Image: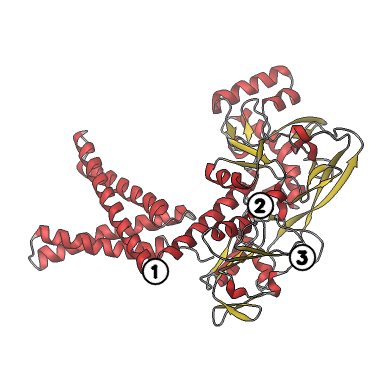
Amino acid sequence: METQKHDAVVVGAGFAGAVFARCLAETGKKILVIEKRTAVGGNMADKYVENILVHTYGPHIFHTNMPKVFDFLKRFSQWFKYEHRVMGKIEGKLVPIPFNFTAIDTLFDCAEADKLKAKLSRVFGENKTISIFGLLNHHDEELKHFGKYVYEKVFAGYTAKQWGVSIDKIEPSTINRVPVVTGYDDRYFSDFIQMMPLEGYTKLFNNLVDHKNISVLLNTNAKDKIRLDFDSRKIFFEDREYRGIVFFTGAVDELLDYKYGRLPYRSLDLVFEKHEKPEYQRASVVNYPNDEKWTRITEFKHFTSPAKDTSEKTLILKEYPSVYEPEAVREPFYPVINSESKAVYEKYAHDLSGFPCFYLCGRLAEYKYYNMDAVIERALELAEQIKIKTLFSPHLLLIKEITLYGIIGSCCAALDSVIFLLLRKAGVNLYAANFISINAGICTSFLLNTFINFKVKDKLKIRGVKFFAVGYTGLLLSMLVMHIGVKALGAKEMIVKIVSVFIVAAVQFTLNKLFTFKKETV
């Protein structure tokens, strides 16, 4: 296959790879998708067994608060509304997960339940979601005791089984994915878009890659095709230099032969069972956080459009968490994210950053616990970045960024002045008003440059600190220029002020371009 005829090689045909490939293909780019499995779809793949649509690698439910993501997917499948509900076996009883007022009514006596529900509503509000850590760290002893109960019954055992370590060794953000609800809403997700593809995910993926500019190479390991030369910083495909884009969605430690050690993942042993009855359990998924060896049981008929639910048989899936071993016949489902694994991943990412046309995207490639919609959003963003690079030469892109930076700066300077005048009229101290207005201008400038001009959304806190540092550096530089121009050189104040504006703007733009808004190349 003549790879130079392709503008991009995409490794992996899950959501990250398939979405990216489709976006670039629609701009006229020729795309080669390499997938090591025998079909597209990644872990979202499904198939019919006993006339029941089964999720091959465990349950996947699409939910999002990002309309642009769903608007993109709607082009490739019909959908039906599906609100996911999960139950958990707690003290021998099935209760809703996330833990809500129904669970309280089921597990506590009436008087205690009513008292607890009233306090939760009063303190947190009705129909709100609460972090389990918000309860555990609350100053009220009764709420703290309740939080400890939920923590031990719902989170501790399940987390220990799922991750193979005690719950205190797991990153809090992973545990906080499941909240406590102050009401009777028993939906597992609160997103306003919750749907399932009518004909399944595999059909959706087949439609995604069905484009004249996309070629798909299945049952192929990308490592057998791609070689990275770290001395020359060149990419080779089938031993010939390749100058196009490589969009990689696989495991970076495997790609680089585990040179810094293996990144830890958790896997699953998936055990399917057929039962000769119309229904096995009340909910699509039932969690078993405590006694059983499996973590959950999925019954796939609950995912099916009601019009298709006619079988007198049912299929279930039991999930047994296990260690991921590349040599075993298992998949790396969940990255085990902690300070040590992050440090190892950063070494791999740093090595790959030397290849400007090599992009990482997805749960494995970026070593992040992504939801489906977040992966799709990330792929859409990277595709958009590459489209912009294609449309604009580096010089034109720089001119565009400078122009937008100047427009944004002017608008924020005007905002600074308006806020200052309003605060002064309100009787605010001169220096306090100046401090508030300047910071409001810098903050607004940061947000506009982040989302409109440079379009980088990662590491916002770090970038924000850098932007403010550059802003205050500019302020000090302005004062220095004014002092030298007026005091030392005797120039007119207004002329020096105008000159200082251009000098400071040029310095600030350069610093922000090089440091604050420097885009990751992977």
Q: CA distance from mark 2 to mark 3?
A: 31 Å
Mark 2 or 3, which is nearer the eye?
A: 2
Residue 86 against residue 357 in the figure, above or below: above
User: Quick one: SS at disc 3?
Assistant: loop
Q: Residues within 10 Å of mark 2 (few under 14, many from 20)?
A: some
Q: Looking at this view, name the residue that lies furthest to the top.
A: 111
Q: Position of residue 64 (x, y in %)?
A: 59, 41
The residue lying toward the viewer, choosing from 256 and 145, is 256
Q: Residues within 10 Å of mark 3 (few under 14, many from 20)?
A: few
Q: Are marks 3 and 1 in contact (CB under 8 Å)?
A: no
Q: Position of residue 315 (x, y in %)?
A: 85, 41
Residue 284 against residue 230 in the figure, above or below: above
Q: Which mark is residue 301?
A: none
Amino acid type, callout 3: Pro
Q: Which mark is residue 394?
A: 1
Q: CA distance from mark 2 to mark 1?
A: 34 Å
Q: Earlier in the sequence, mark 2 or mark 3?
A: 2
Residue 152, quarter of picture: top right
Q: Position of residue 325 (x, y in %)?
A: 78, 63
Q: CA distance from mark 3 to mark 1?
A: 41 Å
Q: Looking at this view, name the residue that lies furthest to the front.
A: 212
Residue 380 against residue 228 in the figure, above or below: above
Amino acid type, callout 1: Pro
Q: Earlier in the sequence, mark 3 or mark 1?
A: 3
The residue lying toward the viewer, choosing from 318 and 68, is 68
Q: Position of residue 156 (x, y in %)?
A: 72, 43
The quadrant of the picture occupied by the C terminus is bottom right
- Residue linked to disc 2: 207
Amino acid type, callout 2: Asn
Q: Are marks 2 and 1 in contact (CB under 8 Å)?
A: no
- Residue linked to disc 3: 326
